[in-house]
């Protein structure tokens, strides 16, 4: 699922589709966080709890956890309130989103390969 979301992110017009790209980044990151949680034998439907878990039980730093929560809030505003995120938000944060995605993917792969 993460690979498909990443592919869709790359195909979209950054200026015009910024709100949807932001939602896709969140969904991809959420899938990776959910994978970590499941590998530890837990499950939650609460996204805030998911982010808190990742912040407490992984190598994610405070800034990364704060950004994940910021992205969660932005995703909710876009998805539920019809908020149209400014493309400049995507421009400013996309590098961070990609870095966090890479880190989470690495954590998932590491746990998977260690049999955890």
Image (cartoon, rainbow, N blue to C red):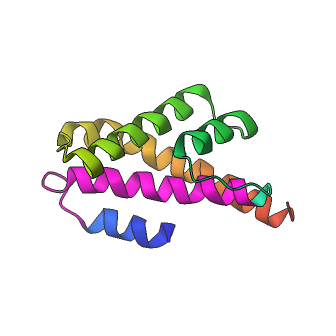
Q: Is residue 23 above or below residue 112?
A: above
Q: Is residue 31 covered in magenta?
A: yes
Q: Quadrant of residue 9?
A: bottom left
Q: Is residue 36 covered in magenta?
A: yes
- Bounds of the magenta segment: 12-38
Residue 94 horizontal/vertical position (percent): 36, 44
Q: Quadrant of the C terminus?
A: bottom right
Q: How many numbered markers are drawn?
A: 0
Outermost residue on the right side: it is: 115
Residue depicted at x 55% and y 33%: 65
Would residue 80 be seen by someone viewing this image from the given angle?
yes
Residue 2 horizontal/vertical position (percent): 50, 66
Q: Quadrant of residue 77?
A: top left
Outermost residue on the left side: it is: 16
Residue depicted at x 60% and y 48%: 103
In the foreground, 115 or 92 = 115
Residue 89 horizontal/vertical position (percent): 26, 37
> Taking 11 as reference, is 73 left or right?
right
Q: Is residue 90 above or below residue 34?
A: above
> Taking 78 as reference, is 109 left or right?
right
Would residue 105 be seen by someone viewing this image from the given angle?
no
Q: Is residue 28 above or below residue 65?
A: below
Residue depicted at x 30% and y 35%: 92
Q: Is residue 2 above or below residue 53?
A: below
Residue depicted at x 69% and y 56%: 43
In the foreground, 75 or 1 = 75
Residue 87 horizontal/vertical position (percent): 19, 43
> How would you classify the magenta stretch by its main secondary structure?
helix
Outermost residue on the top side: it is: 62
């Amino acid at each position: 699922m993460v690979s498909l979301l990443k592919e869709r992110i790359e195909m979209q017009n950054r200026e015009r589709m910024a709100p949807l790209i932001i939602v896709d980044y969140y969904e991809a990151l959420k899938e990776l966080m959910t994978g970590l949680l499941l590998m530890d034998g837990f499950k939650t439907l609460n996204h805030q709890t998911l982010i808190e878990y990742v912040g407490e039980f992984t190598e994610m730093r405070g800034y990364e956890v704060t950004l994940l929560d910021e992205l969660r809030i932005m995703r909710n505003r876009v998805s539920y309130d019809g908020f149209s995120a400014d493309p400049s938000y995507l421009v400013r944060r996309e590098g961070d989103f990609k870095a966090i995605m890479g880190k989470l993917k690495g954590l998932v792969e590491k746990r998977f390969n260690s049999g955890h």
